[in-house]
């Protein structure tokens, strides 16, 4: 347990159509799924988010969870905590580690 949360790795299954029009199932990983009572947080960790493509890659599994639980991306980049257009909280690893209430921002 970390900060009182049970922590697991998560998998999100999505259905896509490949370039030949064939339906395929893909599994996307969620780095951490943190549960405590009725609370759940999905957390992705990324060394850096240098461009839109990297951000989309990191948030892809989060936007496909199919529920309304909180989603967080943690990065080494020095960014003030903010919610992006997908409703995902993006914050620096420093804010996450130094603020015990960072998941509740």
Image: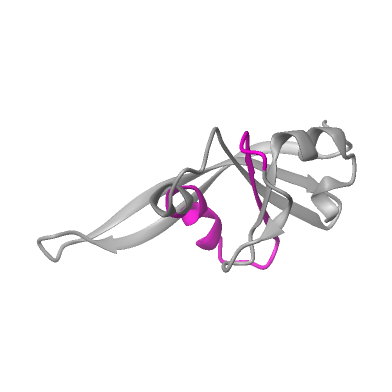
**Quadrant holding the N terminus:** top right
Looking at the picture, tell me which residue is in the foreground, 1 or 60. Answer: 60
Count of marks placed on residues = 0
Residue 50, x across and y down, in percent: 47, 43
Q: Position of residue 33 (x, y in %)?
A: 67, 44
Looking at the image, the residue that sits furthest to the left is 20
Residue at 73% in and 44% down: 34
Q: Residue at x 50, y 61 (%)?
A: 64
Which quadrant would residue 31 be assigned to in this image?
A: top right
Q: Quadrant of the C terminus?
A: bottom right
Q: Is residue 45 magenta?
A: no
Question: Residue 12: image x %, image y %?
Answer: 49, 52
Q: Residue at x 44, y 55 (%)?
A: 56
Query: Closest to the observer: 45 or 50?
Result: 50
User: Residue drawn 86% across and 52% down?
Assistant: 37
Q: With 66 as the anchor, is 37 left or right in this view?
A: right
In the image, residue 77 sits, relative to residue 26, either above or below, namely above
Of residue 74 and residue 23, the one placed in the foreground of this image is: 74
What's drawn in magenta, residue-wise?
Answer: 56-78
| Residue 11 as seen in the image, left or right of residue 27 | right
Quarter where residue 104 is shown? bottom right
**Residue 64 among magenta residues:** yes
The location of residue 87, given as percent across then percent down, is: 64, 66
């Amino acid at each position: 347990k970390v900060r009182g949360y049970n922590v697991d790795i998560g998998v999100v299954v999505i259905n896509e159509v490949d370039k030949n029009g064939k339906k395929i199932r893909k599994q996307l990983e969620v780095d951490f799924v943190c549960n405590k009572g009725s609370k759940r947080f999905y957390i992705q960790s990324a060394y850096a988010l240098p461009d839109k493509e990297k951000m989309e890659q990191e948030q892809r599994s989060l936007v496909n969870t199919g529920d309304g639980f909180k989603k967080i991306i943690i990065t080494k980049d020095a960014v003030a905590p903010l919610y992006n257009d997908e409703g995902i909280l993006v914050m620096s690893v420093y804010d996450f580690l130094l603020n015990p209430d960072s998941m509740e921002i």
